Image (cartoon, rainbow, N blue to C red):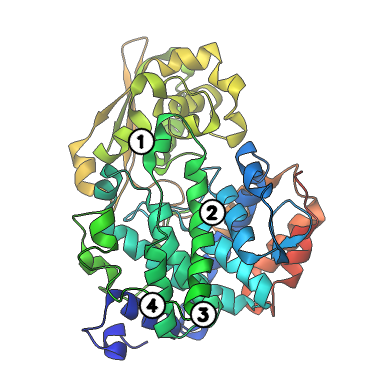
Amino acid sequence: MADTGDAVGSGASISRRLAQWSVDVRYDALPPATRGRVGQFLLDYLGIALRGSTLDSSRPVRSLGQPPGPATVLGRAGGVGAEWAALANGMAAHSMELDDTYLPGSVHNESFVLATVLALAQERDASGREVIEATVTGWEVACRAAAALRPAVTNARGFHPTGTCGALGAATAAARMLGLDAERTAAAIGIATSQASGLLEYVTDGAWTKRFHAGWAAHAGIVAARLAAAGMTAPATAIEGRFGFLHAYSGDPDTDLLLDGLGDGYAIDRTALKYHPCNYYIQSVNDSVLALVRDGVRAEDVASVLVHTVSAAVPLVCEPLAVRRRPAVMIDAQFSVPFNVALALSTGRVSFRDFTPRMFADPGLRDLMDRVDYRVEPDFDRRYPAEWPGRVDVVLHDGSTRSAQTLHARGDPRNPLSWAEVVDKHRGIVAGLVAEPDGDQIIAVVEDLDRQPDMAALTRALSRIRVD
């Protein structure tokens, strides 16, 4: 593949160079492993979004008046317009805290990229290969934008990269699905910069707006691409300009990360597939606690727990500590180090089925949560964001200390899940919700994605699943 600078000139704007690269991506040039990653994430997305569609937070968007169309709102009868399916399904997919994480950018791509791509694939009778191409391009742009903002910096400003950068990634994927050329794709990306949104204030009271960010990014991306196709313009320097995306959402960006090495490897290959239903800062913590449980540590023997983490984790999953020790709703628990540690010590697992009011109020878990504290580990800060490590020191009642450390959480590309493990995760998430024949068909279609002439077989299986 030609370097994007050769294709359009090194003086072209960032959005124009990203756009040229995205229209040049071809299935045949993608490594087999990269194609396979799309299938893994698609299966993961479908399971998470189906289960997420059963949550109360998914109901408001399904109650909105939506024009009929060919795209599936998961769990609901009848099709709707692609923009609306992407909004509903993207929000559902981000509600479980089980979707992927691109660590250098702290961004979750499954929810907005795959919600966008699948909705438009249904609308346009796109093939599996087209789905793969569009997914890779949207994923790349979102990840590069998020890494360039620098997670700790943009988070400190109160912005959620899944919402802000997700709009750019979704617009790129949508433009690819709609067959736009590089000029119109660049316009779509530029339009999306004016739609980018998402505030971290949800951490204060467990509000549903976090989940909304992913769905809105998918919705915005499709709208941006349609507007670009109709001739709407956007600033050429919408990303790097004086009043552009990078300045607004970071103020201290690493602009080189947007273009350096573009076409030499793919961000989707370097994206972690989550294993535990919680914020990614807690993934390695949970792996460490579960390792101690497997080695014989029992909840009743624990006097205190000290969790070592990175500075960026503190305002999201550690503080205010008194609040994190008393989760009231699911999203509170998804962002609570004390709850996850106590749950893992008590049950030997971290399952979304345990993120319930009954467990939040459990006296034993509350007692354990009160014994969990944290400390910022300077060495972990030096590794971040390339690595998101965690270490847990458990002091037992007999005075001894047991410790475990995880540098790469389960599902990290450096500690990957196999296809069989992804299937097992998917089946566990949809158990009791999806009939076995439909579940088998979904898995078979995704496993053979690049041979699908369209998404009709997948749509038939999905259309039979009801959550209302």
Q: Are marks 2 and 4 in contact (CB under 8 Å)?
A: no
The mark found on residue 230 in the picture is 3
Which residue appears at 55% of the width and 79% of the height? 178
Q: Earlier in the sequence, mark 3 or mark 1?
A: 3
Image quarter for residue 454? bottom right
Name the residue that disc number 1 marks.
316
Name the residue that disc number 2 marks.
215
Name the residue that disc number 4 marks.
186
Quadrant showing the C terminus: top right
Q: Earlier in the sequence, mark 3 or mark 4?
A: 4
| Residue 260, x across and y down, in percent | 25, 73
Q: Secondary structure at mark 3?
A: loop
Cα–Cα span, label 2 and label 3: 23 Å
Quadrant showing the N terminus: bottom left
Looking at the picture, tell me which residue is in the foreground, 434 or 12. 12
Cα–Cα span, label 3 and label 4: 13 Å
Q: Nearer the viewer, mark 3 or mark 4?
A: 3
| Residue 31, x across and y down, in percent | 46, 77
Q: Earlier in the sequence, mark 1 or mark 4?
A: 4
Which residue appears at 51% of the width and 85% of the height? 28
| Drawn side of residue 313 relative to residue 40, left or right | left
